[in-house]
Every structure is written in C-alpha cells, then in structure tokens.
Image (tube, helix red, strand yellow):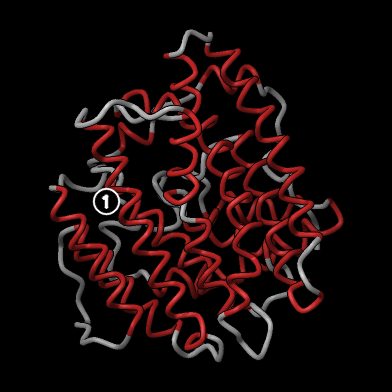
Amino acid sequence: MSDAGPSGYFSIRNDVVDRLLHGAHRLAGVPEKDRGAVLRAAAGAVPEAEGLLRHSTGLFADGDSTASRLSFSCLSAAATFPHARPDQIADLGALTTILFGIDDIADDIAGQWSHGDVAAFFARLSAGVSGPSPRSSAAPPDPMGQALHAWQGWCDRFHRHPGAAAHVPTLVRRLELAGAAMARERVWAAGGEPWPAYDDYLANGRVTILYPTWWAAALAICGPAPADPAHWESIAPATALGAACMRLANDIRTFERERSEGKPNSVLILERAGMTVEAAVERVSGHIAELNAAFAAALAELPPALAGVAEGQRRSVAFNGAWYMARDTHAYTVQDLVRDVGAHGV
C-alpha cells in the first residue's frame, strides 16, 4: 500500500480506545522472557519476506512506510512460532502481509471494485493455491494484479513445504469461505442489506479476520509431520474461537475507521442499539474474556500430536489481542522493529 491514496484512511485514529486503554503495551502478549528472541526472529525474517513482495510495492508498502504492515506481520509470525526456521517465519509473515492486502481490496481501500470483480479475484486466489500457473517477472500496476502476482509467488514457495499437499484442500476451502464472508460484508457496507445482529456479525467476522485461512497454511508450514488433513478438523473448533477473539480485539481498535467506511463492527452495532461507545467497548472486552476462556479450554483438549499447534494458537491470540489494545498494525516500520530489538538486548 502506498502512502499516496489511502494515507487518509490509515491516519484515522481511535482516540476513544487510546483513552480507555491508556498504558496498554504492544508486546504485552509476548512472554517477557521470550521478547528478545521473538523480536530478533522477526527482524531476521523481514528481508526475506520483503523480497517476496518486492515487485508489488504499489499494494504492499516498503518496510519504512507508515502504511506498511510488513514488520508487524513478521513479528506476529515470530510471536506465534518463536522456534521456527527463518524461512518459515518469512513465509508466514509474507502471508500475513498479503492477506492484509487482500482485505484492503475487498474493502475498496486499495481501488474500487464491483462485487463481481471481488468474486473473480477470490476465485483466482483459490486457483493459485491448487497448482502452479505462469507468473511474469513484473507485477501489473493495479492493486488486484499486484496482489495476485504476490500470491502466486507465495504459493510457489508454499508448495515447497512438505506438508503443503495435505493441506491445500483446506486452504482452498478457507479462501472460498473468506470470499463469501467478505462479499456479505460488502453488501452490508453498501446498504444492500440491513446491518446484522451482533451474533450474526461475529459469525461472519471470525471468517473475514482470516485467522482460519492463515492457520490452514500454517499447518503445512509449521504443523506436525507427517501432515494429515484430519489435523484441520481437530483444530477447527479452537480456531473458530481464536478467530472470534481476534475479530473482537480488531473491532475495538478499528471501530472509528469502520464508522467512516459505513461498515458494521461489533462496537458500532452495540452503539446503534443504544449503548454509549464506552459501554460498548466494555461489553466487547468482556466478551473477549469469555471467548478466551473457551479458547483455552478447547486448546487443552487437542491431542498431544497437535501440542505445537495449540501453543502457537495460544501465542498468536495473546500477541495480536494485546497489540490491538495498544495500537494498529500499520506504521510499525522496520526501524521501529530494530529499535525494539535494541531495547530488549541481545
């Protein structure tokens, strides 16, 4: 994402949340003993992840831009899998960055698209996972073309992981579900249908947060060997709970931005029902706490073979939830990450 077009969008602040959550720390979700190692792993993965996106800088801002999510994305991957290899963290960090771009396209932040354009876009994303396709060295100039170019390059790397073949059908299905859920959000935002009730919104939003999509890929990259498609069925209930936690934490951080877009958001839905914004934030925060307890219980029931996945999901939701309480995901530059590495010693 360049600093030009969408800079106004990225500059929208949420002063209410900053006031209510004053003192929240962006790294609170990373155990203190692990912070130095996690930060160093993220910083080490940034160059490789950035290399995967270097032909698509019109959509994916370079790491020193205020619109960049690259450093955050690598940090989130490292916080999830702190002991993963650098190439695994880079692949997962690049995936997160690409998913942000996909979301920006679906939300008409990166370009303006018809519903048909977005449906065709998701069909091409799904097809890209299923098998190799020709890829030019130069990315097209439009955001959708740049996203597809970066996606194909990422998919080429994804297929090199031993677990990829087993988990491709799940990843394809998660992309199909995400496309349908984002289409629903577009209709709500355009006024084509009334805003949903809170529970209906959350059922859809835990898909559009793309946490399940990310984990379908993460199973192949960092999951247990030998890879088994049944692993997804085992983690799906916990993943849905983790996704709900992530969606609501994101909503608390972004409701002012989504107010400007006319998009439903859990806080805004409660506000429309008559709550003050402060009461709505408190209600959503309480719901996150309830969901986190259910999430922990679901992770505890996973079999020993999936212990690493359970730990990764616990770490991921803890990191991202705390981050959203403190700040947004963009404008955390490579230099910010380097400074954090220095602040946490060697």
Q: Residue at x 31, y 51 (%)?
A: 1
Give 48 or 222, whichever is nearer the viewer. Answer: 222
Locate residue 190, reporting x and y percent. Answer: 21, 32
Locate residue 204, reporting x and y percent. Answer: 43, 44
Locate residue 84, reporting x and y percent. Answer: 68, 76
Give 1 or 145, whichever is nearer the viewer. Answer: 145
Picture quadrant of residue 288:
top right
145 relative to 184, above or below: below
Report the label total. Answer: 1
Picture quadrant of residue 163:
bottom right
| Element type where label 1 sits in the image | helix
Q: Residue at x 66, y 31 (%)?
A: 287
Q: Residue at x 26, y 72 (%)?
A: 149
Give 228 or 121, whichever is nearer the viewer. Answer: 228
Quadrant occupied by the C terminus: bottom right
Decide: few, some or many residues near mark 1? Use Cα within 10 Å; few <14, some 14-19, many ≥20: many
Is 125 on the left or on the right of 252, as rendered? left
Is 10 on the left or on the right of 31, as rendered? left
Locate residue 312, reporting x and y percent. Answer: 70, 64
Q: Which residue is mark 1?
A: 105
Is 153 on the left or on the right of 120, as rendered? right
Q: Residue at x 72, y 56 (%)?
A: 315
Give 223 or 12, whichever is nearer the viewer. Answer: 223
Amino acid type of the residue that numbered disc 1 sits on in the rendered structure: Ile
180 relative to 322, above or below: below
106 relative to 196, above or below: below
